[in-house]
Image (cartoon, rainbow, N blue to C red):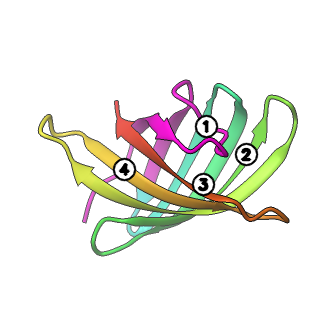
Amino acid sequence: MVDYQGKKFVVVENSENGEVSTETVFHYFQDGDVISGTYEGGEIERGTLIGVVNRDGSLDFRYNHVSIHKKIRSGTCHSTPENLPNGKLRMHEKWQWNGLERDSGTSIVEEI
């Protein structure tokens, strides 16, 4: 199982309909197979996530945030790890907004 405890990630790529950017930093915490985290930066004033670490190291989680424009958003995400040659992780994410629009997209975050 991948150990996510204390890891920090930054966005390197995101769909146009996403709100996180290269200025957004994610901080992950892990307790057994439960993942949680916080994120902020760019258009995101404050965000949280909570979910599970699957046996293959992938993550399934729900996220919630408040934008700098005071808009509250939430959604779900499946994130698959890739081990980079430098020993860091790259996460390939497929996400979907909750709410009326139900738009979906993809993003890539990398460990810093």
Depth order, front residue of 97/83:
97
Residue that mark 3 sits on: 49
Marks 2 and 1: which is nearer the front? Answer: 1
Disc 2 to disc 3: CB gap under 8 Å: no
Question: How far apart are the alpha carbons under marks 1 and 3?
Answer: 13 Å
Q: Mark 3 or mark 1, which is nearer the start of the sequence? A: 1
Residue drawn 27% across the image and 59% down it: 2
Residue that mark 4 sits on: 91
Tag 2, which secondary structure? strand
Question: How far apart are the alpha carbons under marks 3 and 4?
Answer: 15 Å
Depth order, front residue of 40/105:
105
Q: Residues within 10 Å of mark 2 (few under 14, many from 20)?
A: many
Residue that mark 2 sits on: 65
Residue drawn 55% across the image and 64% down it: 61
Tag 3, which secondary structure? strand
Q: Is residue 61 above or below residue 6?
A: below
Question: Could you tell me which quadrant the N terminus lies in?
Answer: bottom left
Residue 70 is situated, as x and y percent measured from the top left of the image, at 87, 36
Q: Mark 1 or mark 4, which is nearer the start of the sequence? A: 1
Residue type at numbered disc 1: Val
Q: Confirm whether the magenta stretch covers residue 20.
A: yes
Q: Residues within 10 Å of mark 4 (few under 14, many from 20)?
A: many
Q: Residues within 10 Å of mark 3 (few under 14, many from 20)?
A: many
Residue type at numbered disc 4: Met
Question: How far apart are the alpha carbons under marks 2 and 4?
Answer: 20 Å
Residue type at numbered disc 3: Leu
Asked if residue 85 shows in the view, the reply is yes
Tag 1, which secondary structure? loop
Q: Which residues are magenta?
A: 1-29
